[in-house]
Amino acid sequence: MFCRQCGAEIEKEAHLCPRCGAPTSSTGNFATNENSDPNSQQQFYEYGGEYNPPGAHVSPPPRQPFYKKRWFIITAFLSLTLVSVIVMMIGKSPSKSKALDQQPDHPGAVSEQQRTYGSDEDNLAIGETARYSDYEITLVSVEPYERGDRAYFEIEGKRKTTIKRYWFEGTAATRKTLSIDEASETLDQSLPEKIPLADGQSFNGYVYFEGGGLSSIRFSGGVLSSDRTWNFDQDASTAEQQEADEYFAALEKFGLTPDESENVRALFNELGIAGCQIDQTEAMFGSGIDELQSFRTWIGINPEKGKLNHGVFEHQINFTFEERRIFYVEITGFIVGTDQNKSYTLFNSDEGGYLARYIPESDSVEPW
């Protein structure tokens, strides 16, 4: 047969013309067989609709760009889809790197990471500062007043917020909780019940606690796990004398002498319950201190243990006198069904005296 481009004779099985290199019919070109006349009719090879006269040089068809090929389009589509999904997931996930302190104009809530800032300040002294993300509080001084002790605080706002006076809680040297004086708003320089703060705004004033012997102040901060505590324990002899005075003041009305009330205090110390609310002691039944008389008082539970382990916040202490001497002491109020029983006998003179001891730190009872 003959090439339709240049008319040269080519082998029947050939794919390209040996003279001009044009493709034969088997590869897309038209070629005549050996009986055909290459000039007898006007045949053409079409590339994109273009007419190619016999003998003209024809370039091979242009190759399709890779970005128009199907495999590339599919691959690019899938890649873009995957990237979009990843970006959306990152955008929705919380990021700790964007703390609110990097957004001073943000009016929203403070992150938990900021709330726990300063957790190494759990034990402070007079003159030291408890730092929070939106305010700082400094205990300047502690001094007595007519119904107890008062603590002078300086508070500085770091952003707009409100703190509350009841977030302060006092503890006496006798481990008794001291409540805030409800009449303190009428007293000199008392901090208000609610303390509004703006960025850079300061408040100075007293928090008044009823009862003497203030030895520590806990500030809750209004948020879980944000407590700060100022400790300023008095010397041991002063604290012991204050405790002895409190016991006699509470038990004198039932007819006990100073020595007898001191014996009660010494026994309660050994039993681990000297920090009870002795001033709230009540007579329950009996004929009088000279014969048989029973009393009750209460002891507060370590807040962490009370909330987490038992769901109660104080235990009742029952103690009984016979012929002016204690012969029975019981602590009760433990929740049935927990790892503790409902009540424990700490002391019973009919059973040899000391039987068990209360451990305030763990809110548990250990055998003697």
Image: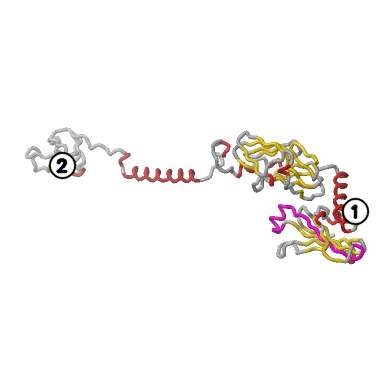
Q: Quadrant of residue 121?
A: top right
On screen, residue 52 versus residue 147, left or right, reads left
Disc 2 crowd rating (10 Å Cα; few below 14, some 14-19, many 20+) is some
Tell me the amino acid under the disc marked 1. Glu
Residue 262 got which mark? 1
Q: Which image quarter holds the N terminus?
A: top left
Q: CA distance from mark 1 to mark 2?
A: 127 Å
Q: Which image quarter holds the C terminus?
A: bottom right
The colouring scheme, among rainbow, by chain, secondary structure or one colour, is secondary structure
Residue 59: horizontal and vertical position, in percent? Answer: 21, 34
Upstream in sequence: badge 1 or badge 2: 2
The segment highlighted magenta reads: 289-312
Residue pictured at 75% horizontal, 57% vertical: 314
Residue 30 got which mark? 2
On screen, residue 157 versus residue 21, left or right, reads right
Nearer to us of marks 1 and 2 is 1
Give the secondary structure at mark 2: loop
**Res. 355 visible in picture:** no
Give the secondary structure at mark 1: helix
Q: Is residue 296 magenta?
A: yes
Disc 1 crowd rating (10 Å Cα; few below 14, some 14-19, many 20+) is some
Location of residue 205 with respect to 329 vertically, above or below: above
